[in-house]
């Protein structure tokens, strides 16, 4: 493919992209021509939905985009642009420094615009910021909010829809030996078990009871950290006949978590109990 094209040959150790036969066909179709200035071969590019971006993003500057970030808050349009560049419509976007929650705002706004199903994970180390700023903004973006007009009064901003789950990190569930960490409180283990079994969260304030919750006609019980009133070490964590009698009643299916059981499998089946041993049958995902 070292033929002459518009009076030019390819540079040394190089060759044209196409065979001479195809080059002639492209010339006839107007896809290949001499450059009006240099006379060198010039290929016509097909129209595409993809645009090459200037690494300095001067196109944004020309469009009047404001680069300043008041109070350190990122611009929603800037984050939307980045998300479009690096992800698909069903991607999960992780922001390890959530701050004011701009990333969540951008994801929800993009989903509204193009019907995407993007999800976001926000991480914020400062608890007061996470709860009072990050989560509060995401709520307002989802549900809508009011802003003050320059000349007085307020204006309603419609919500973008969607939802999110607020989670708080606690002590590690397991220690280095694979046992339940002694620092883990009853309430924290109860929340973990109920969510991992049902996919549903427990209320922020829960009643300290071995019956931690009911979902889909199944009652979930936890025998842990003296919940049955036994002050001895690991007291009440074993399912026995006496413990069973003292549990809150439920007529349907029951799943009981504890360190062990002294009831036979036939008796457990008879009274509608599935027993799960701690820590071996705790779900960790």
Image (spheres, grey):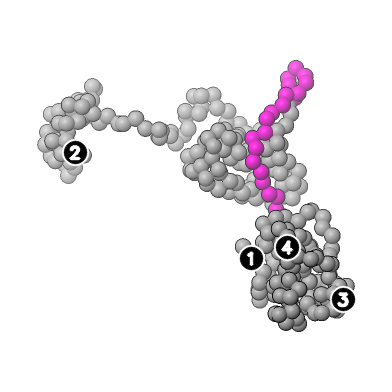
Q: Position of residue 189 (x, y in %)?
A: 74, 65
- Residue 61 covered by magenta stretch: no
Q: Judge by depth and name the residue closer to the eye, 223 or 30.
A: 223
According to the picture, the residue beneath numbered tag 3 turns out to be 230
The image's mark for residue 218 is 4
Q: CA distance from mark 3 to mark 4?
A: 26 Å
- Sequence-wise, the earlier of marks 2 and 3 is 2
Q: Residue at x 20, y 27 (%)?
A: 29
- Residue 162 covered by magenta stretch: yes
Q: CA distance from mark 4 to mark 1?
A: 21 Å
Query: What secondary structure is found at the residue carrying circle 1?
Result: loop
Query: What secondary structure is found at the residue carrying circle 4?
Result: strand
Q: CA distance from mark 1 to mark 2?
A: 57 Å
According to the picture, the residue beneath numbered tag 1 turns out to be 284
Query: What secondary structure is found at the residue carrying circle 2?
Result: loop
The image's mark for residue 18 is 2
Tag nearer the camera, 4 or 1: 4
86 to the left or right of 127: left
């Amino acid at each position: 493919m070292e033929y002459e094209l518009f009076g030019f040959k390819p540079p040394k150790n190089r060759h044209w992209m196409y065979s001479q036969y195809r080059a002639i066909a492209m010339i006839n179709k107007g896809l290949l021509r001499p450059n009006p200035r240099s006379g060198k071969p010039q290929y016509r590019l097909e129209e595409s939905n993809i645009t090459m971006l200037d690494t300095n993003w001067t196109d944004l500057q020309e469009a009047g985009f404001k680069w300043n970030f008041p109070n350190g808050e990122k611009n929603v349009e800037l984050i939307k642009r980045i998300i479009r560049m690096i992800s698909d419509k069903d991607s999960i976007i992780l922001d390890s420094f959530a701050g004011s929650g701009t990333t969540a705002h951008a994801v929800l706004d993009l989903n509204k615009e193009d019907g995407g199903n993007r999800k976001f994970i926000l991480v914020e180390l400062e608890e007061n910021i996470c709860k009072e700023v990050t989560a509060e903004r995401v709520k307002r973006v989802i549900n809508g909010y009011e802003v003050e007009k320059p000349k007085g009064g307020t204006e309603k901003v419609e919500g973008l829809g969607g939802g999110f789950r607020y989670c708080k990190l606690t002590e590690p569930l397991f220690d280095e030996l694979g046992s339940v960490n002694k620092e883990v409180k009853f309430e924290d283990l109860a929340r973990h078990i109920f969510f991992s079994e049902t996919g549903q969260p427990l209320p922020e304030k829960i009643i300290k009871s071995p019956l931690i919750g009911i979902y889909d006609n199944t009652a979930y019980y936890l025998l842990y950290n003296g919940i049955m009133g036994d002050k001895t070490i690991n007291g009440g964590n074993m399912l026995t006949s006496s413990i069973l009698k003292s549990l809150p009643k439920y007529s349907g299916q029951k799943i009981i978590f504890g360190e062990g059981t002294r009831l036979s499998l036939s008796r457990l089946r008879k009274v509608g109990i599935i027993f799960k041993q701690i820590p071996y049958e705790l779900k960790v995902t």
